[in-house]
Amino acid sequence: MTQGDSQAVISLRNIRKSFGGRTVLDGVNLDVRRGETMVIMGGSGSGKSTLLRLIIGSFPPDSGSIRLLGQEMVGLKRTALDDIRRRFGILFQSGALFNSMTLAENVALPIHEHTNLDREIIDIQVKIKLELVGLLEHADKYPAQISGGMKKRAGLARALALDPEILFYDEPSAGLDPVTSAQIDRLISDLTQKLGVTSVVVTHEMDSAFSIADRMAMFDSGRMLAVESREWFNTLRHTDEAHAEALPPDQRLIRQFLRGDAEGPITQRKHTDALARALFGDDVVISTPSIIPTRSA
């Protein structure tokens, strides 16, 4: 996508971020188109969750530009930032529900906080959101009374409370069994289609990624290795060994991650770094491997 594409609701240019002298994001560029589901992949420490927090304005980048819904986020004042935040919703990894509130009260909270709607209208809105995620009959239950998958769905209902234009998902399948994970994946896809929202999903679960994505972005050690269609990544995942040797280094690394292979560039790098530590001690500056292979293929 070109920089001036009018379809981009999220546009990142040359994003850099460091913590304690360690570079977490190194010149990242990314565009997310209106109405699509963009899956951001990478192992623990790759930078994908940091990128998500930068996009939503939790903290600023060291340099670069972040445009969200046509607004430059970098340097934005608090009141203007709050206005933008009302236009997107977030499903946190844990669900982040308030344990002292029922599911209905959790969903109603952002509506109470950010609108002047009458209580009767709010009650109707809450019922609609809970029905969208299949939890209307559980509206009066507390988080401690429901399963992990139901907590994720309740968190999603709350993220939908203000009718957002963009939904952000942070590891939506984390900690769920395969069947529940598949149900969450289907719910994400259904909501994206029914509501026309743009979805950004951060995950390292390959089954989920290939189930819901329109396009996919691959991170490694703070670098964006590729932003391509789901079909492109799927073709790479199924490239046989005979042809894989001729692939560029980044594509061979991506292929290993997608397949969850035990051998490849990721594990070779881990062995190299382990040897460097053994020889030179823990103070040696080495590139920390950020991608952990999964079993999904």
Image: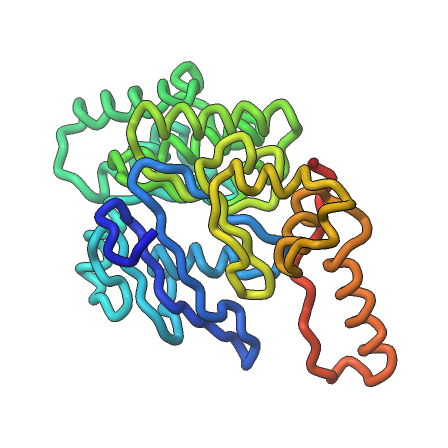
**Drawn side of residue 158 relative to residue 169, left or right:** left
**Drawn side of residue 144 relative to residue 244, left or right:** left
Vertical placement of residue 63 versus 232, above or below: below
Image coordinates for residue 264, horizontal then vertical, percent? 77, 55
Among the 4 quarters of the image, the one containing residue 22: bottom right
Image coordinates for residue 71, horizontal then vertical, percent? 21, 57
Image coordinates for residue 35, horizontal then vertical, percent? 31, 36
Vertical placement of residue 224 versus 214, above or below: below
Among the 4 quarters of the image, the one containing residue 171: top right
**Drawn side of residue 228 relative to residue 253, left or right:** left
Q: Residue at x 50, y 55 (%)?
A: 49
Q: Residue at x 25, y 34 (%)?
A: 163
Residue 96 visible somewhere in the drawing: no
Q: Residue at x 27, y 62 (%)?
A: 73
**Drawn side of residue 152 relative to residue 244, left or right:** left
Q: How many marks?
A: 0
Residue 222 visible somewhere in the drawing: yes
The residue at the far top in this view is 137
Q: Quadrant of the C terminus?
A: top right
Vertical placement of residue 213 versus 85, above or below: above
Nearer to the camera, 169 or 210: 210
Nearer to the camera, 158 or 22: 22
Among the 4 quarters of the image, the one containing residue 147: top right
